[in-house]
Image (spheres, coloured by chain):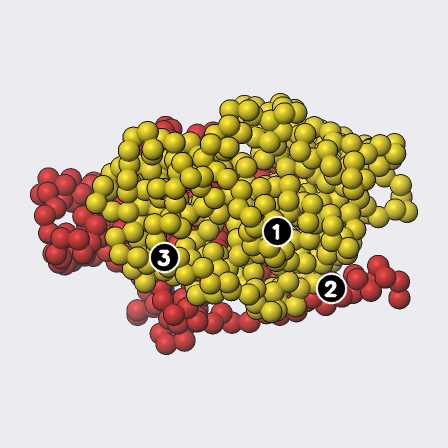
Chain colours: A yellow, B red
Amino acid sequence: MKYVDEYRDAELGQALATQIVATVEPGRHYKVMEVCGGHTHTIYKYGVDDLLPENVELVHGPGCPVCVIPMGRVDDGIAVALEPNVIFTCFGDMMRVPGGNGTLLEAKASGADVRMVYSPLDALRIARENPDRDVVFFAVGFETTAPSTALTLMRAKAEGIRNFSVFCNHVTIVPPLRALLDSPDLRLDGFVGPGHVSTVVGARPFEFIPSAYGRPIVISGFEPLDVLQSVHMILRQLAEGRCEVENQYSRVVPYDGNPAALRVLAEVFELRPHFEWRGLGFISSSGLRLSDAYAEFDTELRYSIPGVRVADPKACQCGEVLKGVIKPWECKVFGTACTPERPIGTCMVSSEGACAAYYNFGRFEREREAVR
Amino acid sequence: MTADSLTASRQRAALELIERVRAKPLRFRDPKLTMAHGAGGKASQTLIEGLFMPLLGSDSLRELGDAGSLRVDGVGLALTTDSFVVKPIRFPGGSIGELAVNGTVNDLAVSGARPLALTLSLVLEEGLATDELRAEIEAIAEAAEAAQVHVVAGDTKVVERGHCDSMYVCTTGIGQIDPRASLSPASVRPGDKILVSGSIGEHGTAVMLARGEFELEAQVESDTRPLWPAVDALLETVGGSLRCMRDATRGGVASVLNELARASGVSVLVREAEVPIEPAVNGACEILGIDPMYVANEGAFVAFVAPEAAEDALGALRSVSGCERAAEIGSVGADPPGLVLVQTAFGGRRVMDMLVGDPLPRIC
């Protein structure tokens, strides 16, 4: 594939791997967090960490939009999906996330009309095609996906489509990063910064990470060479005693972000005072809801939402995993009670989830030891 | 013990526990069926091994091959059955009727049996246009002729509108096991080579795009075709060196490799760069975030052959129409049993597990 294969070149990968080995101090252990679930996925899909020296460890951060949705919100979504006359639409990954009361997939098997969509615009199209049904879109994701939800809502408003609403679970990237950096048990040397979020918000909002917390961050693209190069850039900052925001993904990330996208976000959404994150608890000003101008499209105002808070299962340590405090395999239920087929925690559900990715990797690790 | 070695030993203990849990017989505990149970991945496997096998398990069924086998007066017969529920019923490169014939004769072929005859069961929806039915019966007749089988018995049911989607087709096939074939997962050995009979992922991609849900267009046609000529060529050329074959339908090449790794108690290493995939399939899968290794085929199979016969087997396959892109994609190892690894084109390695959940709509 043109313009894609170039970023997956094995020879360039090997060259970067050699440079990385030359950059690290042999006796030192490096912990680098990739914030974004998309990066986690790339790392596993291409075996990127296989090319890193043993003393460079990648820690998977909280940037998987599916993984951070608390169980109570899933239950709320299911309650809406079970309302008469509702067509409930969501991204595919979301359908397998367990709430306190089963998954959307199970709700579908019980008769709820739950449909997978690839874009909120697909949900709007379903609304247009089914004027006598009420179509709800389960919106999840960071600033990456929020603008497409915003544009969909603007279009719904312009076309006067009344049978469409959005169950908004959009979140913002900076507050959880700050919460993470504030947690006392965290030990990280640097961050592979989110790429697609940054196409919207830019690199500027991450300046607090080097300035206030003294950690380097490199905004990274999603192809394997991007990730490998970003890790190299972080290690080079550490080796040279620098600490700054660098932009590896400059082909799509401008320093100030995308002003048009930021404008639609500001028009359609407003910050919630606080929002609950799976494993991280309530974080102030971290979630979005529809602004007053779009209140007519707000699922939470249109239906009575149970809004029950469901505590994360006791045995589940998704929070510690999301903070990078423990490795997935250190969780007590990892791989035994909690598996991709039967997930307890959200990190095991999405292919971007740290546990699901590690579940397979761990088996590989054992194989690698056998080979040695 | 240093902190690092303590961590390493704890990690090993955790991973060994996981392997023990994985090795346990599958238990079926789901309260309700979901689409995932029909997707050919882990949920399907759990349903079959956890519910059907304990109640129905004959020796032949326990092998979980593409067809069952029985001996009648010294003659080896293979028997298989399949239901076809694809939506839409017509798609680029084929239709439900053609699929219903090829799907069943191919299950026989990869079991080393020359297809002899089919039965045909139709479940038709009230209101179905006669022209549509006629077109499918014509497709069945043509496909049966191409595969050199006769339809020898049949049944028709009509259900109320809304109770089935246009039409469901069930076919049962019988074939005679070829004396040149001695196929069994148990005969797979470390060092064996793994071949695919052609480029992969075309059927699933064609059907997915034909549904028009993604506003994505590409020139991709289903690969539905009878596979006996390819199997015949393999048996003629390498005969006893052919260990085992599987039709890479639902769940794709990845699921078939996992099934065989598990059934044979071996590990499998796939070299991603060697897997033949059409650029249009690759592009569509890239956009939709689907791995072509998990996408269904209706005219491609996976064959395990002895290493010394791999070259000849490949030559034999490539001489058959439709299999020109046949390729050696990997090899068999010993440890850890049941695991499928991929050497990525980028140079790293990862595990390729069975499909979990259902990424795709009804495709066969």
| Chain for numbered disc 2 | B
Q: Which residue is mark 3?
A: A304
Name which residue type carries label 3: Ser
Number of the front mark, 2 or 3: 3
Q: Which residue is found at the position 53% from the left and 29% from the top? A: A262
Q: Is residue A252 visible?
A: yes
Q: Which residue is found at the position 21% from the left and 50% from the top? A: B165
> How far apart are the alpha carbons under marks 1 and 3?
24 Å
Instruction: Please report whichever mark, 1 or 3, sits nearer to the chain's N-terminal start.
Output: 1
- Locate residue A362: give its quadrant: bottom right
> How far apart are the alpha carbons under marks 2 and 3?
49 Å
Q: Which residue is mark 2?
A: B12
Q: Is residue B93 visible?
A: no
> How far apart are the alpha carbons under marks 2 and 1?
36 Å
Element assignment for label 3: loop
Q: Which residue is mark 1?
A: A283
Rendered location of residue A123, percent (x, y): 35, 40
Crowdedness near tag 1: few (<14), some (14–19) or many (≥20) residues, C-alpha within 10 Å: some
